[in-house]
Amino acid sequence: MLFNLCNHRIGAITHGHGPSSVCNDLSWANKQITEIVGWSFIMAQWLWCEGTFLAVLVATVVAQKAMPPDPIINLMSTDTKCQMLEKVPCGFLGISPENCEAIGCCFDGQQCYYGNVVTVQCTRDGQFVVVVSKDSTVPQLDLTTISTLGGNEVPCSPVVSTGSFVIYNFPVTTCGTVMAGDYLIYENKMTSSYEVGVGPLGSITRDSTFELLFQCKYLGSELVSLMADVYTVAPPPPVAAPGPLRVELRLANGQCNTKGCDEEVSAYSSYYEDSDYPVTKVLRQPVYVEVRILGRTDPNIVLLLENCWATSTPDPLGVPQWNLIVNGCPYQGDKYLTALVPVDGSSGLSFPTHYKRFIFKMFTFVDPASLHHLEQKVFIHCSTAVCHPSATDNCEQRCFRKSWCN
């Protein structure tokens, strides 16, 4: 299945917010729904912001309550949630009251802290943060009985444990987490054990039961740009664009200096540094391009190149333009076809599916009226997507590879 959620890629680059820029920064929606079903107290919380939080999560807490036959129901208010004797800091230093409340925490005018409920957060670098209060159930929860699908061994054990809270922090790809749904969704489950008293005519318990299904959902598309130049000018801005999934486009500069060496393999043995750009190339000289996912260790995701093109300005919509890759395949309108370079297990990379490579021959734009060479920079742009293989989609982009024209 293909996770391609970016409907405004060009705008994302223009405004510098990645695919999430369709949402105003710090535009949060925070909704809590509380209901009583039989003797079960169910709290569901949705936290969402496309501009800043970079993740959508759903957390559900089910706490079985020992109630009298005719119970008096008291729902937990916001004031009750935030009445804490022990205040564990939540969020980054200097977080605003609005952002503090948006990520499910409490603000007392001076600091942001976790309330006496369950808080689930998804980080930019692919981590679960789950904070459980002993007061999240009635009667109070025994925090020592909680475990994830991966058990209680490192890294699935709590990183902080106090008398009132336990805090878990582990990568979304560990501790029994599974992928689900039509997006990049990582899902795990947390449960508690409880003590059962067994008598001659029946069994009882006085402990709360706790079950938490929690998810991290990540956007799966990104657009990045990189610049190459025919002439020597001042260095360009940084080449990486931030987003829910960080993708980098860079140029390789390895040399094939030994007899019988593979030029493609040797070329991708080293890369230009940021300070080397813009790179000066001779016309028709091969330009070795690599696009890769940064900061991810999930071997199940596959990077796809949708389209790659060149412009004479940093604007991806600017003209003139020249296509390099169209719908994942070399642009057929070019006499010098772009060459797609396979990246597999023999490449020596830890996660070869996180990489895409291609080669094109250097060119310069010409004036449409005079047909004279334009002494301008050449900017390379690529739109990307992330795919998760399934029974119906192996995420392979099929193109007939053709050799260079001389």
Image: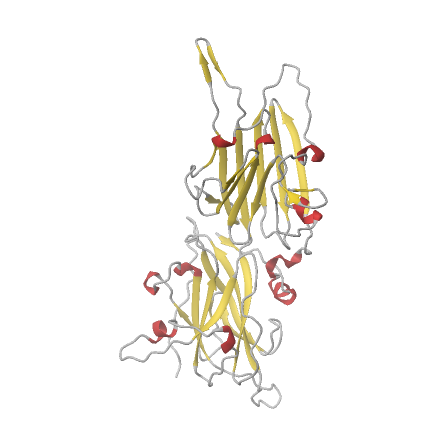
Residue 349 locus on image (x, y percent): 37, 62
Residue 339 horizontal side relative to residue 4, left or right: left
Residue 301 locus on image (x, y percent): 45, 54
Q: Identify which residue, 267 or 272, lies in the foreground.
A: 272
Image label count: 0
Residue 214 locus on image (x, y percent): 54, 40
Q: Identify which residue, 366 or 35, lies in the foreground.
A: 35
Q: Residue at left 47%, top 12%?
A: 202
151 vs 382: above or below: above
Residue 110 locus on image (x, y percent): 70, 46
Of the 4 image quadrants, the one containing the C terminus is bottom left
Most distant residue in the left direction = 259
Most distant residue in the top direction = 201
Residue 55 horizontal side relative to residue 250, left or right: right
Q: Residue at left 34%, top 60%?
A: 345
Q: Identify which residue, 191 or 373, lies in the foreground.
A: 191
Q: Identify which residue, 392 or 137, lies in the foreground.
A: 137
Colouring convention used in this rendered image of the protein: secondary structure
225 vs 21: above or below: below
Q: Residue at left 68%, top 56%?
A: 25
